[in-house]
Image (cartoon, rainbow, N blue to C red):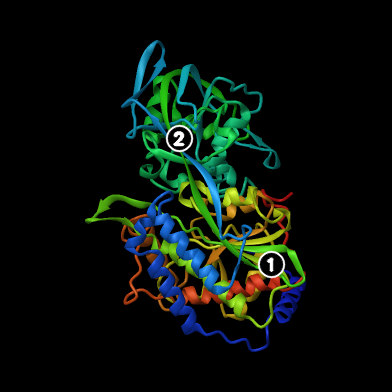
Amino acid sequence: MKRINIYLALLFFILLACSHESGNKYDTQKIYKNLEGDILTISADSMLGRAPFTIGEERATSYIAGRMKEIGLNPVFDSSYFQDVPMVSITSELPSSIDFKVNGSNFSLKVDDDICLWSPTVKKEVAITNSPLVFAGFGINAPEYGWNDYADLDVKGKIVVVLVNDPGYYLKDSSMFTGYAMTYYGRWRYKFEEAERQGALGCVIVHEDGPAGYPWAVAGSKSNSPILYLDSKELENPTCKLNGWITLSAARKLFDEVGLNYDEIKQRAITKEFKPLALNASLNLKIRNKVERSLSKNVAGYIKGTENPDEFIVYTAHWDHLGVGKPVNGDSIYNGASDNAAAVAWMLSIAELYQNSAIKPKRSVVFLAPTAEESGLFGSEYFTKNCPFDISNALACFNYDVVLFIGHFKDVTVTGYGHSNLDSLLEVVAKRHNRYIDLDPNPENGMFYRSDQLPFLKAGVPSMFAKGYTHQSDLGKEKTLERINSYWQNTYHKPCDEFNPEKDNLDGLVDDVILFYEVGDAIAGTDFKPEFSKKSEFFR
């Protein structure tokens, strides 16, 4: 991590001095009490896990809108705090096994156990007829890295099989993509998007726990299950009509069946000299899609800027979670206290600090609780594409997601460090609070591309995903990292993600409310404009 430029540091101190009253005091007890109340309410059993299109959505979004009104925020959508988000649920019905044709014989893989497939289209029936399989490396076309797995490859009518993540993960060379840290090119969403752009009929990703960042149970759960999408014309007749994942063991068996060694071919794919190759296998498959359309809701309020109201910054924290699902230890309500009720509470508390400040921001400040983050960032994507303000006037986005209730932190961990000079601004403000900047301990998981800052980045808005995370003040760094690992294994996306006021500690969340209020106000209260780094894939 490079030292920040001294000139920038001085500039930011000036900005902070301009945007805050000397000796500013915060009522931390009041902030704590408000956070606790909001978390308890938003993650209560009565919210039924806050799944979109349920009574849980109605209750959660009504509560959030009521809090925004109580705080005194202006409705973002004319006279309403709600933005309808048109969505469609598609369930692709598959047989119990998928038969590939290899050398005139059938090669079968079990659905769910070996392979997971679905069709991203509102067409009721999809027919895949004698479609050849092609191994296309990582399925990446990245001119800035001099990498194109599709060079001289015609994939029309074909199904591409690709690797998850990007070459940097395996080479661990920072000059190749970003080394061990995943880029957007490594994300499954990009693989499907690029396959569509290239004209492929289908795209299947080989799953591996490490480079994917999650187990097969997460990736392979979409067959014969409803999948949410934004309801758009792109779903009417996409070129890429088949998406999916295949396990590593099943991929090895398939390659063996066609006379290839998967591990040897994979090693070739990590080099720029790699050339795609036919797998001498084909697929015949008929899929029936069940399609249901519904509306979900984004919730947003704002404070109008006093001097440049057309320019704005955005705080985001998604309200949705997983609803009622498979019981674990007799509990079927996925409350989502840390993911993401606490982040919504964080955002509302920041809004109160702005609203109660004697000095109002020069630029507008928007507070957005989007829907359907868990389904694919669809609420924030819809907001950026249908923004009631001119999205080109958005100066910064601060997103918050997944909170640890373990007290004060010495660190502020930046996931996606190096994409903009927001990092330098954060470092200056963090130092004022005797905190230091740390980096994501698991950059290979690509978390920077898995939460609601991504649609803003793609819309050209410098964005930040940061929080106290890796160094709890009393535990120390090593034990904090152990708590992090325990959280991901035992709490994340499970019914036990609940808030207990008697055991959990929100001091760190209070600290982050104050920290990110000051960071945001250093932009909203001044003329400073954040900029992307030229090394970011979102630089324009």
State the mark number for residue 240: none
| Mark nearer the viewer, 1 or 2 | 1
Asked whether the viewer can see residue 469, the reply is: no
Q: Position of residue 164 (x, y in %)?
A: 50, 39
Nearer-N-terminus badge (1/2): 2
Q: Work out which quarter of the rendered image holds the N terminus and state it.
A: bottom right
Which quarter of the figure has residue 521?
bottom right
Q: Position of residue 534 (x, y in %)?
A: 73, 53
Q: Is residue 104 above or below residue 9?
A: above
Q: Is residue 121 left or right of residue 7?
A: left
State the mark number for residue 206: 2
Circle 1 crowding by C-alpha within 10 Å: few under 14, some 14–19, many from 20: many
Q: Is residue 452 left or right of residue 7?
A: left
Which quarter of the figure has residue 249?
top left
Q: Position of residue 341 (x, y in %)?
A: 44, 64
- Amino acid type, callout 1: Ser
Residue identifier under label 1 = 364
Q: What residue lies at 49% left-to-right and 67% top-to-bottom?
A: 66
Q: Is residue 205 above or below residue 34?
A: above
Q: Is residue 299 left or right of residue 177?
A: left
Q: Position of residue 379 (x, y in %)?
A: 54, 51
Q: What residue lies at 41% left-to-right and 16% top-to-bottom?
A: 102
Check disc 2 and report its element: helix, strand or loop.
strand
Q: What residue lies at 45% left-to-right and 35% top-to-bottom?
A: 206
Residue closest to the eye, 143 or 331: 331
Q: Is residue 504 left or right of residue 79?
A: left
Check disc 1 and report its element: helix, strand or loop.
strand
